[in-house]
Image: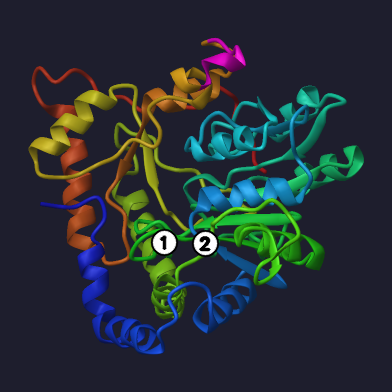
Amino acid sequence: MIPFVDLGAQYASIKEEIIEAIQRVLESGQFTLGREVDAFEAEFAAYCQAAQGVGVNTGTSALHLALLAAGIGPGDEVITVPFTFVATVSAIHYTGATPVFVDIDPRTFTIDVAAIEAAITPRTRAIIPVHLYGQPADMDPLLDIARRHRLVVIEDAAQAHGAEYRGCRVGSLGDMACFSFYPGKNLGAYGEGGMVVTSNPELARTIRMLRDWGAEKKYHHVLKGYNYRLETIQAAVLRVKLRRLEAWTEARRAAAGRYDRLLEGSPVATPQVMPYARHVFHIYAVRTAERAVLQESLRARDIQTGIHYPTPVHLLPAFADLGYRRGQFPQAERAADEVLSLPMFAELTAAQCEAVSEAIRATASEPGSGAISAGRPSVQVQEA
């Protein structure tokens, strides 16, 4: 069986260091915030080329607090994409603001920057570009739009630890950036975790208070806050993993390159990496118009896959009240119908990549399976 992700293999490579880190926390008697969290915040912020990091309990909480720190609330609008995990949009909803969607660029699955200005109204306060699958959104023109319209930019970098845009790390590009440390992420905890990174000291100060009941110091509550603190054990685990992140990222990028070569000329469309991007391949998503056939064929061969994501947010029942209809964001809708995530993790072997690729080619030639054809962007692809 080829798993979609293999956290057991990762653990085996760092077992002794993880045990030592957890033991250190147990012996310290400090289990919420504390020195391990302080150290991880500093280390991860530096990794992201940002001045400060504020650890929280989830990536969703990171988005929520970043929006609140930016002053977003009822009556405001926040622009983002419908092709993302629901947490991006839920965090906007938590503040009382209204999500406003813009379609994606079908080459990258990230926000179509050319469509942003048409979505701006007098109520627009912020833009959340999602660095989906590990590839950064096209940030230079986005930041130019934000500056001209005086909008806050909050990067959703939940899938993009270590990704780069024109040589700069995601996390250093917008006003704030939000990361998730869900176990399956490129940098994942043994539980939940998240972080906001920023180089704005006032935003960092506000988020630190908001995550801990709005307290500036113990029992002195300046703001109406939340219990969003990062657990000490998770910070200790993440410090161990952060030291390996660059090596793991290069292993993912090598596996992606291997897939690219093995699937060249095959009946699926492979990811397009933009010239400005260092893609970190949290997800390696191919496109096919016959996804169900391909996924079932791979399952029959004991190859696990995923779909990220089968329904764009504007078509989810939970957000029907926003009033969007099918057909309004055709690129997001088409991507949701076509993407299939192949096994991707740092320990993925060349033999496993070959087996997956051979299975994809074999599916196309199976009698009675139906023709497998690549899902393709329905726009002219231009060089960036």
Q: Tell which of 41 and 300 is nearer to you.
A: 41
348 is higher (above) or lower (below) than 321: below
Relative to 282, say whether 347 is above or below.
below
Residue 330, horizontal then vertical, whole percent: 54, 18
Q: Position of residue 183 (x, y in %)?
A: 35, 59
Distance of label 2 from label 1 (alpha carbons): 7 Å
Q: Pointers 2 and 1 in contact (CB under 8 A)?
A: yes
User: Which of the two residues, 368 or 192, is positioned nearer the viewer here?
Assistant: 192
Query: Quick one: label 2, few (<14), some, or many (20+) residues within 10 Å?
Result: many
Of residues 182 and 256, the one drawn nearer to the viewer in this rendering = 182
Q: Is residue 359 left or right of residue 380?
A: left
Identify the residue position indicated by label 1 in the image. 186
Q: Quadrant of residue 169?
A: bottom right
Residue 190 is left or right of residue 96, and the answer is left
Based on the picture, tell me whether residue 322 belongs to the magenta stretch: yes
Q: Earlier in the sequence, mark 2 or mark 1?
A: 2
Question: SS of the residue at dot 2?
Answer: loop
Q: Amino acid at mark 2?
A: His
Amino acid type assigned to the residue bearing label 1 in the image: Asn
Disc 1 is placed on an element classified as: loop
Q: Position of residue 79 (x, y in %)?
A: 70, 32
Q: Which mark is residue 348?
A: none
- Residue numbers of the magenta segment: 319-325
Please name the residue shown 53% across and 47% down the image: 60
Q: Which residue is located at x 16 percent, y 50 percent? A: 355
Whether residue 365 is in magenta: the answer is no
Task: Note whether residue 278 is visible.
Answer: no
In the rendered image, residue 126, in percent from the top left (x then y), is placed at: 76, 39
Q: Which residue is mark 2?
A: 161
